[in-house]
Amino acid sequence: FTNSEVGGTSTFYHKKTLYDPMLASAIQKNLLKQTELNDRRTNESNFYVVKNTKMPAVLIELAFISNPKEENLLNSTKFQGKVSDGIITGLKEFFESASKIRGEKNAK
């Protein structure tokens, strides 16, 4: 990125089902809680890796290596642990919510 002051976290998805934005939102929310980086939001995209799957998928832009502060964070094992925790918590939250929705659909 050309501007070294730009930074933050964003999560990209392609809306194939209601689960895609739900997954992106859960992961983004929990990454922000853990890392306290700037919120660059969830964004719908046509990236191949999220568009051409049958399952919900996201692409996470954790931070900017063009931003010296964020580059240092990305090299920190402490920060990497926070990122892992945020992703794991986001996945757990997503699966809990998705299973409730599936349960409601099956009950009908």
Image: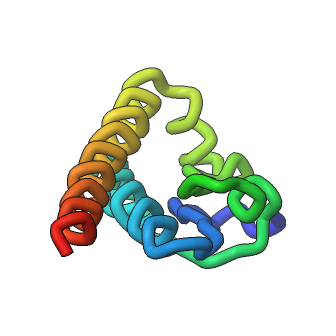
Q: Toward which corner of the image does residue 71 lie, by quadrant?
A: top right
Instruction: Give the farthest residue toward the top.
Output: 77
Is residue 4 shown left or right of residue 100? Answer: right
Q: Of 108 and 58, which appears nearest the observer?
A: 108
Q: Of 62 and 4, which appears nearest the observer?
A: 62
| Residue 35 versus residue 83 in the image, above or below | below
Q: Residue 16 at what x, y percent from top left?
A: 61, 72
Q: Residue 56 at what x, y percent from top left?
A: 54, 57
Q: Which quarter shows the N terminus?
A: bottom right
Identified at 47% across, 72% down, the residue is 21
Q: Of 94 and 66, which appears nearest the observer?
A: 94
- Residue 77 seen: yes
Q: How is the image coloured?
A: rainbow
Instruction: Give the farthest residue toward the front.
Output: 108
Identified at 34% across, 60% down, the residue is 26
Q: Toward which corner of the image does residue 51 lie, by quadrant?
A: bottom right
Q: Residue 76 at what x, y percent from top left?
A: 49, 26
| Residue 11 versus residue 42 in the image, above or below | above
Identified at 39% across, 55% down, the residue is 27
Identified at 45% across, 21% down, the residue is 77
Is residue 11 shown left or right of residue 100? Answer: right
- Residue 60 seen: no
Q: Residue 95 at what x, y percent from top left?
A: 30, 49
| Residue 72 versus residue 77 in the image, above or below | below
| Residue 81 versus residue 71 in the image, above or below | above
